[in-house]
Image (spheres, rainbow, N blue to C red):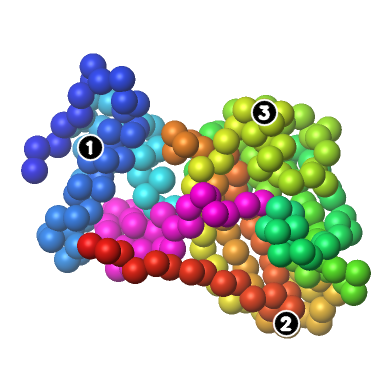
Amino acid sequence: MVLQINHKSALPLHVQVEKLLRELIDKPEYREGKMLPNEVELAKRLGISRNTVRHATNRLVYEGLLIRKKGIGTKVADNNNVVTRLESWHSFTQEMNNKGMSFRIFEIDVNWVKPDNTVANFFSISHSTEILSMERLRGLDSGPIVHFISYFHPRVGLTGKEDFSKPLYKMLEEEYATVVATSREEITAKLADEKIAAKLKIKPGSPILKRKRFVMDPGGRPVEYNIGYYNAEHFTYLIEIQKSSK
């Protein structure tokens, strides 16, 4: 396969690289364990910056399609994560309203923070760039059920003075012209540490669901990195997958 992109195309370079990487992923030799070209080599071949290659690679790593190991290289993952399209997906507030459930907000905490490695890599920003962090503790009258932590890309333009009690994605679209289009999710079962247990009013070591959500706009640009900690005793996460007609 010839590794090349069109430098005169109106399609952004990182999108072209992403398409190229997806084509490589489908090759039998890479599915069988062959390492992908490293970022420096690929950047030289394509005549672009390493950061552009890293941007495209990060996207596929967060989709669970690639695994990157420091000092070793990048290879195709053995399994793929579930991808949830937002045509039938809403913010938590909208989703609960649609179900006729009245959820309370127990706490909202908004701060400007410097991202850790994971968040900075997802947003493709410097670790020294301050971003908005918003934590919300949600639940029923009987008590909290879920603790959300959201980080937002600086491009969105949030100030920290917004009314975060409103449906989040509706507010982003109406007030900041930021439309969310795709959510990629990673769900794991965990035992609550002391901090999360205190938030959810449960005993340390109680079972919880930890869900990471990577939210992108229609152009594939990251908008939000969200972590949700759910009380597993009171919450079931349902994923519906339709069989492909192909």
For disc 1, the neighbor class at 10 Å (few under 14, some 14 to 19, many from 20) is some
Find the magenta span and give its range: 63-91
Q: Earlier in the sequence, mark 1 or mark 3?
A: 1
Residue beneath label 2, please? 233
Q: Amino acid at mark 1?
A: Leu
- Compared to residue 51, the image places residue 169 above or below, namely below
Residue 39 lies left or right of residue 194; in this view the side is: left
Quadrant into which the N terminus falls: top left
Residue beneath label 1, please? 42
- Compared to residue 70, the image places residue 53 above or below, namely above
Check disc 3 and report its element: helix, strand or loop: helix
Residue at mark 1 to residue at mark 3: CA–CA distance = 36 Å
Tell me where residue 100 appears, x and y as whole percent. Answer: 77, 64
Q: Amino acid at mark 2?
A: Glu
Give the mark toward the camera: 2 or 1.
Answer: 2
Residue displayed at 67% across by 35% down: 172
Residue displayed at 48% across by 52% down: 85
Q: Amino acid at mark 3?
A: Tyr
Residue displayed at 19% across by 55% down: 26
